[in-house]
């Protein structure tokens, strides 16, 4: 396979613009890193999910799905529900910390099995992930020639791998800071606000699809 560095760089730019945006998955990685909870495993699962979803999107499904207005609206609606629930959970967590819930409970180590299941749930039950990987990255990659698709996919996966492991181990270095109740409350509140903003963005996107 001959690498096409132009398409590879295109994949890096597009995937990077999608993945770096703070969302539910990235915040989950950060919180697990702060808890020193199987950082490498969580980062690896997030990367492998990206690899699978991007591959499915790039090699044909992304372009086909993008043509279905109904599917796009269903996916967007589910994404809004997921994000609103995540925002509610974050605000609830911040309120419990404020009222004196033992902060140690936030850092309780999960088993490997529970970590795997939770990471898969946060990733695969979040429709926003499908929009980024299958619809956006996938639909762009699906328009390329067969040989160029591999280079585009490689670039997309390279930035995903670097991002999740850098995010996980970078956040782990900040764990001491977030042992403070106010810092953890701030993280939960900021998380909730970001989830609301993303949900609002999805609502605007759905409105645009309907009105198109």
Image (spheres, rainbow, N blue to C red):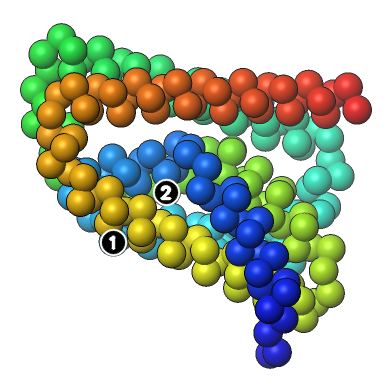
Q: Does 202 sit above or below residue 95?
A: below
Residue 76, image x and y in percent?
67, 31
Residue 56 got which mark? none
In front: 8, or 33? 8
The residue to which callout 1 is attached is 40
Q: Secondary structure at mark 1?
A: helix
Residue 122, image x and y in percent?
43, 41
In front: 83, or 204? 204
On the image, which quarter does residue 68 sit in? top right
Outermost residue on the top side: it is: 99
Give left or right: position of 48 versus 41.
Answer: right
**Labels in figure, total:** 2
Q: Does 12 sit above or below residue 187?
A: below
Residue 61 in view here: no
- Residue sitting at 76 percent across and 76 percent down? 148
- Residue sitting at 17 percent across and 43 percent down? 175
Residue 120 got which mark? 2
Residue 11, image x and y in percent?
66, 64
- Classify 10 Å Cα crowding around label 1: few (below 14), some (14-19), many (20 and above): some
- Residue sitting at 57 percent across and 62 percent down? 52
């Amino acid at each position: 396979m001959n690498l096409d560095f132009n398409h590879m760089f295109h994949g890096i730019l597009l995937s990077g613009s999608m993945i770096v945006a703070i969302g539910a998955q990235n915040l989950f990685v950060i919180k697990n890193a702060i808890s020193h909870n199987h950082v490498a495993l969580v980062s690896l699962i997030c990367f492998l999910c990206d690899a699978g979803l991007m591959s499915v999107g790039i090699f044909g499904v992304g372009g086909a799905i993008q043509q279905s207005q109904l599917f796009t609206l269903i996916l967007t609606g589910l994404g809004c529900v997921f994000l609103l629930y995540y925002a509610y959970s974050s605000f609830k967590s911040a309120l419990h910390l404020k009222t004196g819930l033992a902060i140690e409970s936030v850092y309780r180590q999960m088993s490997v099995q529970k970590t795997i299941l939770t990471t898969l749930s946060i990733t695969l039950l979040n429709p926003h992930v499908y929009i980024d990987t299958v619809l956006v990255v996938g639909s762009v990659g699906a328009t390329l020639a067969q040989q160029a698709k591999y280079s585009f996919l490689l670039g997309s996966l390279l930035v995903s791998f670097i991002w999740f492991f850098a995010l996980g181990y970078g956040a782990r270095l900040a764990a001491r800071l977030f042992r403070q109740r106010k810092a953890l409350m701030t993280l939960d509140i900021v998380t909730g606000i970001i989830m609301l903003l993303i949900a609002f963005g999805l609502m605007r996107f759905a409105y645009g699809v309907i009105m198109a």
